[in-house]
Amino acid sequence: MTAIFAWWGGSAAALIALGLLIGLIATGQLLGLLIDTRGRHSLTHMQLSLWTIVILSLVAGVRRLPKHRACSVRKRCANFRKHAKHDCAIRQALASYSLGIGN
């Protein structure tokens, strides 16, 4: 479990750094990613940025688990179908997130 949290935190830090860099390049300000077309800080941009960081970093944390560790857990489990739903849940969360971005 600590491996997931470590990868989650590391990928979140990388995404935050990338967002700050994009904002700096686009507007000349560190928080430029949050500025809308009127030149004001936008709550919508902040929410979209934060949810993107949370979801993508968590997916990266789960995906970066060592393969041998995941396989050993699957071998010990008598009912593999319980663990197969995990990937499906990630796909559904990403699909609903992408629908939310479109609105």
Image (spheres, rainbow, N blue to C red):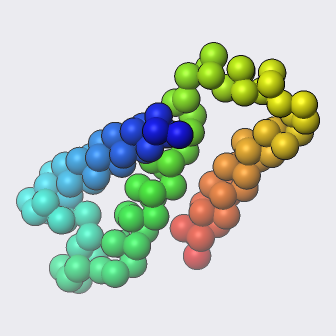
In this rendering, would 79 be left or right of 20?
A: right
Image quadrant in which you'd find residue 82: top right
- Where residue 77 appears, as percent x and y from the top left, is 83, 30
In this rendering, would 2 be left or right of 19?
A: right
For this orientation, the residue located farthest to the top is 68
Along the line of sight, the residue nearer the viewer: 73 or 44: 73
- Where residue 89 appears, as percent x and y from the top left, is 73, 52
Along the line of sight, the residue nearer the viewer: 73 or 23: 73
Count the marks. Answer: 0
- In the rendered image, the vertical position of residue 68 relative to residue 4, given as above or below: above
In this rendering, would 83 be left or right of 51?
A: right
For this orientation, the residue located farthest to the left is 28
Say if residue 73 shows up in the picture.
yes
- In the rendered image, the vertical position of residue 59 relative to residue 43, given as above or below: above
Say if residue 22 shows up in the picture.
no
Along the line of sight, the residue nearer the viewer: 80 or 25: 80
- In the rendered image, the vertical position of residue 91 relative to residue 78, given as above or below: below
Q: Residue at x 20, y 54 (%)?
A: 20
Image quadrant holding the C terminus, namely bottom right
Q: Residue at x 13, y 60 (%)?
A: 30
- In the rendered image, the vertical position of residue 88 relative to residue 32, given as above or below: above
- Where residue 33 appears, as percent x and y from the top left, is 25, 63
Q: Residue at x 39, y 39 (%)?
A: 6
